[in-house]
Amino acid sequence: MKGRKTAVVIAVALICVLLVGVLAACADGQDGVGIKSIEKTGTDGNVDTYTVTYTDGSTFSFQVTNGTDGTNGTDGSSVTALDIYNQYILSSGDESITYQEFIDKYMDVTVGTDNSAAIASVLRSVASVNTEFYETDTSWGPGGITSTDSTALYSGSAVIYKIDDDYTYFITNYHVVYSADANADNLAYSGSGASQQNIARKIVVYLYGSEGSPTFGEQVNGSYQSVNYGDYGIECEYVGGSEQNDIALIRAETSAVKAINSDVKEITFADGYDVGDTAIVIGNTGGDGISVTEGVVSVHSENITLQISSRVTAHRSMRVDASMYGGNSGGGCFNVYGELIGVPHAGNGEEEQGINYAIPVDTVKSVADNIYYYACDSDDSTSGLSALILGVTVTEDNSKYVYDEAAESGKIVADTVVNSVTDGGIAQSLGLQAGDVITSVTLTDADGETDEITIERSYMVAYATYAAKAGDRITITYTRDGSSYTTSGYTVQSGDIQNVW
């Protein structure tokens, strides 16, 4: 199913940030005492004094430093519940009350989140995608087997990954640009630069606000119909992809992209995400153009089974509670700050259950960075996803949920245990043995720049192999029998890097 993915819906309530006007209208707290009003009663230009009046007639004052360039509000006029809580502690000396108890007692109010600003900005970074294939459909009939050649057109979505001087790169799903039914003519008449028969012969994107509807035209190349993409269609090249990660990179000439809209922007990758985070899904729902829906992250990480080609593959995914429709695959799943947290790619086929999936941001970024690197390395022999072959298999043990009270978030961590080591492989040369627990992988490039990848789940080992490049020096930190060790270094050779699917 081309491009199924997307979303819907649960308004997230926040009581964290409360503007002055909201505070003035608060309902009474649970004990009948609430905030009646809050007024600015003095200023020295840099620090403003505010007075809070409660419904029982009591008052107290506190000070707020003015914001700068809107960072903390204009002229300090944006006051948070935390400001009032901290001042309450100082004024009353009651350190036993928690922040949440203070909210419940004095500010029993819920404020809906307005994500319109984040959405408005990120719309410059999304696109709808149309992929064109020459396919052969084989069917059984009264006269036996019948084969029919035709032009097939599929819809999906994409997000802008990088804008270089020459090319603008888009991330989409591998299954959006792949068709198992593509025939030999699809490659023979390909205009996408692909060297594989099953990759789309033509890939066209439309930017938000400049969308179009492809239409079939006259017959060409034998029995195939041509497709007219209109004035806004931007033709792309296939750069590379990974079936096992369901990620592909395509690119268009930057001049062509900016001729349509010079205000396009690259996505910003989030550092991570948590269960319960808002998931704003933007994509080409139903192939009818870019639309926006909203939900939440319901499961941080799980494996789902998908079949893109003849191979059935387990894909690591995040679950969102959003409804899903054809055409959203390859689009963006964003947080309330407009940062990418995932790429929608699959659903369970039962929309009413709200069980749908996106590729997590750490997978998206590591795969896209790898494909981009090898596309730009001036070596025609390298393309697609390439990884360091460590010669080790791993499994997980002691999985548990760890909560960080300071960050007010949690995550699942597990021991990454060496299951087997290949004879003559890099892992063996570094001294790893079955039963070792890998805790980190460190890569140091020729310039001395170091990248330490902490291994908290087994899938993170793959990210290290994607990041490793020829010339890098790799060391692995591990525990054995309760003690921690770091291996000697190994310098990665070009032959240690192989193309992976």
Image (spheres, rainbow, N blue to C red):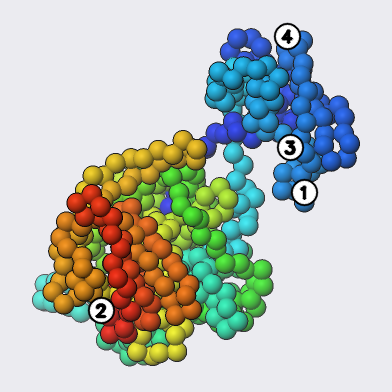
Q: On the image, numbered disc 3 is attached to which residue?
A: 78
What amino acid type should be assigned to the residue bearing mark 2?
Answer: Thr
Q: Give the position of the C terminus as an image quadrant.
A: bottom left
Q: On the image, numbered disc 2 is attached to which residue?
A: 136
Please tell me which of labels 1 and 3 falls first in the chain. 1
Q: Secondary structure at mark 4?
A: loop
Quick check: 9 above or below 421? above
Residue at 46%, 52% in the rendered image: 272
Please tell me which of labels 4 and 3 falls first in the chain. 4
Q: On the image, numbered disc 4 is attached to which residue?
A: 56
Residue 394 visible (yes or no): yes
Q: Which tag is nearer the camera, tag 2 or tag 1?
A: 1
Q: On the image, numbered disc 1 is attached to which residue?
A: 68
What amino acid type should be assigned to the residue bearing mark 4?
Answer: Asp
Total marks drawn?
A: 4
The percent coordinates of residue 362 (x first, y second) are: 41, 59
Q: Secondary structure at mark 3?
A: loop
Distance, label 4 to label 3, CA atoms, is 24 Å
The percent coordinates of residue 485 (x first, y second) are: 28, 59
